[in-house]
Structure formats: C-alpha cells, structure tokens
Image (tube, rainbow, N blue to C red):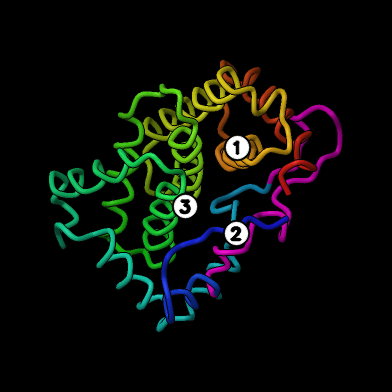
C-alpha cells in the first residue's frame, strides 16, 4: 500500500524526497505490522523508531546522499525556517510555526510535519529540531474542536509522524502528552464523523483512517494501561478498514 504525499517542490528537492522514499513509501512496503489474530495486543508492530516510513537501515543509506540532503535542508530552511537561524530563539520559532498550525487544509500539516521531521531526524539539523519541537507544542495547544475535519485529520497525521521521527529528542512527559492527544483526536474524529467505527470508501473517511493509523502505530509500544482499552479498540477498527484505504 502506498500513500502519495504531494509537496510543491521541483528539481533536486523533488529527487531528494524520492531518495528519502517519503513521497511514495507507506509503511507496508516494509511491513511495520502483521496481523495474527483479532486481538490487537498480538499485532506485530516493529519496535524502535522511526517505524512508519523507513527502517534504521534505510536511514543510513539515505544519509549517504549528502548532496540531496543538503538541497532538501536548503528547501526547508528557505520555506519553513525563515525568522531565525538560532535554535534557542524559541519566541521567533514559535511565532512562525503558530502561523502554520492555524492553517485549515490537511495538506499543510502533512507537508510541514514531513519537512521538519525529516530535516530534524535524517539530517539531524539543530534548527530543524527546534522548529519541529515548537511545531509539536503548537499543535498540542490547539483545541480539538470544530466542524471542519481537515485540520483535525492533518494534526493527527502530523503528531504521529513527529512522535516517530523525533522520538529520541522528546522527553517522557511530552511523549505522554502527544499520546493522549492522538487518542483524543482519534476519538473526536470518530465520534463526530464516524470515519473509523463506520468507515466507508469516501475520501474523508479513507484519509481519516490513514491519519489515525499514522497516529496510532508509533505509540503502540508506549501505551499505558489506563489508555489500553480505547487504544486497541480504535487500532482494531483501523486495521479492519485497511481494505478501504489502500
């Protein structure tokens, strides 16, 4: 199964995304999960991070493409890290990312989280790490509300991606906050639009399930007992809906 992420870039930067396998690679090309029974606790989810899009071995191969990675970093810097070159300048960084998390269309969230997350995790760029962190904090400060499903699905996708790509740079308390937010978002999406428990082949329902899957898989091995019931319930729904979302 492939998820195509359209990012408005050209030339060398577009080649970089292909090299990173992030424009067309969804996790089933190197299966992150294998279903063995109806009990979602028995689901075989790959341990370690990142797990959604690439394996650690793939990351090492990607890092050999220094020219492409430099071009990619320059693209992210000029398009999404404009206000400061100082990773400690959290005021300006937060100002810039707050403007981005106010955007309503789902594509903005997908593009931003992939750009910040890849530059932070693959390139290990300190400024990108600072921007990615503030982007996460900005997402967490936005209310889970509204009648437009676009931003909710986008935020859910973004939090899953950044939890996965920034894992080693996030402290335990922030990881817990992200996990709770992901579960609250999945609940909101399903309770308001029923995309997950009553999935259909429509585009909004399909991407609702994709966003939920991207949010739920990276937190599989970190789920606490008090969240286990709702986590595995929603994961079960999404896994059973896979035939609708490929």
Picture quarter with the N terminus: bottom right
x, y percent for residue 49 = 54, 51
Q: Are marks 3 and 2 in contact (CB under 8 Å)?
A: no
Q: Secondary structure at mark 1?
A: helix
Sequence-wise, which precedes: disc 3 or disc 1? 3
The Cα atoms of the two marked residues, 2 and 1, are separated by: 15 Å
Label ID, residue 165? 3
Q: Earlier in the sequence, mark 3 or mark 2?
A: 2
Left or right for 205, reference 192: right
Q: Is residue 217 visible?
A: no
Residue at position x 59%, y 57% from top? 53
**How many labels, in total?**
3
**Would residue 61 be found to the left or right of residue 105 on screen?**
right
**Secondary structure beneath label 3:** helix
Task: Write the residue at 59% across / 23% down.
Answer: 193
Residue 229 locus on image (x, y percent): 65, 17
Q: Is residue 88 magenta?
A: no
Identify the residue position indicated by label 2 in the image: 4
Cα separation, mark 3 vs mark 1, equals 25 Å
In front here: 93 or 192? Answer: 192
Q: Residue at label 1?
A: 204
10 Å crowding of disc 1: few (<14), some (14-19), many (20+): some
Front-most of 132 and 36?
Answer: 132
- Magenta stretch in the rendered image: 19-45
* Residue 167: image location, x then y, percent: 45, 47
Q: Residues within 10 Å of mark 3 (few under 14, many from 20)?
A: many
Q: Nearer the viewer, mark 3 or mark 2?
A: 2
Q: CA distance from mark 3 to mark 2?
A: 18 Å
Mark 2 vs mark 1: give the one in front: 1
């Amino acid at each position: 199964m492939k998820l195509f992420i359209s990012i408005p870039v050209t030339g060398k930067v577009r080649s970089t995304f292909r090299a990173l396998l992030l424009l067309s690679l969804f996790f089933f090309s190197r299966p992150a999960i294998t279903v063995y029974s109806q009990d979602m606790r028995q689901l075989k989810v790959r341990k370690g991070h990142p797990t959604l899009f690439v394996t650690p071995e793939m990351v090492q191969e990607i890092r050999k493409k220094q020219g492409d990675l430099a071009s990619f970093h320059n693209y992210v810097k000029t398009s999404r890290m404009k206000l400061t070159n100082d990773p400690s300048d959290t005021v300006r960084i937060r100002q810039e990312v707050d403007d981005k998390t106010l955007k309503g269309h789902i594509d903005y969230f997908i593009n931003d989280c992939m750009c910040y997350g890849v530059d932070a995790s693959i390139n290990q760029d300190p400024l990108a790490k600072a921007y990615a962190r503030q982007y996460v904090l900005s997402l967490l400060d936005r209310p889970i509300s509204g009648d437009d499903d676009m931003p909710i699905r986008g935020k859910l996708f973004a939090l899953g991606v950044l939890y996965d790509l920034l894992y080693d740079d996030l402290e335990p308390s922030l990881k817990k906050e992200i996990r709770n937010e992901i579960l609250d978002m999945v609940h909101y999406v399903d309770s308001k639009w029923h995309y997950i428990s009553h999935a259909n082949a429509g585009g909004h329902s399909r991407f609702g399930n994709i966003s939920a899957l991207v949010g739920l898989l990276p937190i599989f091995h970190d789920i606490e007992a008090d969240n286990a019931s709702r986590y595995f319930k929603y994961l079960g729904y999404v896994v059973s809906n896979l035939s609708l979302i490929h």
